[in-house]
Image (cartoon, grey):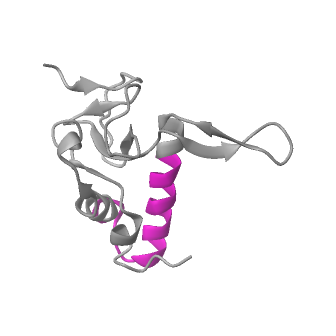
Amino acid sequence: TNLEFVHDNRTYVMDNIVVVAAVDPLGQLASFSNYGRTKVMLAAPGVGINSCSSLPNQFKTNSGTSFSAPQVAATLAMMFVHFPFDSYSQIIDRLRLSVDLLPSLESTTISGGRLNINRALGGKFVL
């Protein structure tokens, strides 16, 4: 079975690109998600996400990697603040090693896991 499916099928040759998959609330890979043991770094929630509606004062539920990727991007931004002397490759390694390991992602992502913001920030995540 070829588990190298990325919707944008370009070859990612830059080591500062973090490709993200989407998972549902149970940690299962979303049917529409990217996956790939050699290209997709980790997964983040992307199914049943509450978001703004075009109607005033209303929310709606959406799904997509477009909801997963910003969570990872924001985590990386916070990591650069918390670990100012780390290089980008060290930050990406920290992110990869901080995931919640999930059997469902073991063969479909590099890290084998789902984003854990608190662990990525060394337990320093405070709202």
- Residue 119 place in picture, x, y as percent: 33, 70
Q: Quadrant of the C terminus?
A: bottom right
Residue at 38% from the left image edge and 32% from the top image edge: 30
Residue at 47% from the left image edge and 41% from the top image edge: 46
* Magenta stretch: includes residue 108: no
Q: Is residue 53 above or below residue 10?
A: below
- Residue 80 place in picture, x, y as percent: 44, 69
The quarter of the picture where residue 98 lies is: bottom left
Q: Which residues are magenta?
A: 69-90
* Residue situated furthest front in the rendering: 26
| Left or right relative to 70: residue 94 | left
- Residue 55 place in picture, x, y as percent: 83, 38
Residue at 42% from the left image edge and 69% from the top image edge: 79
**Residue 84 seen in this snapshot:** no
| Left or right relative to 40: residue 52 | right
Q: Is residue 103 above or below residue 125?
A: above
* Magenta stretch: includes residue 86: yes
| Left or right relative to 91: residue 75 | right
**Residue 108 seen in this snapshot:** yes
Task: Tally the marks.
Answer: 0
| Depth order, front residue of 93/69 | 69
Q: Is residue 54 above or below residue 16?
A: above
| Left or right relative to 83: residue 74 | right
Q: Quadrant of the N terminus?
A: top left
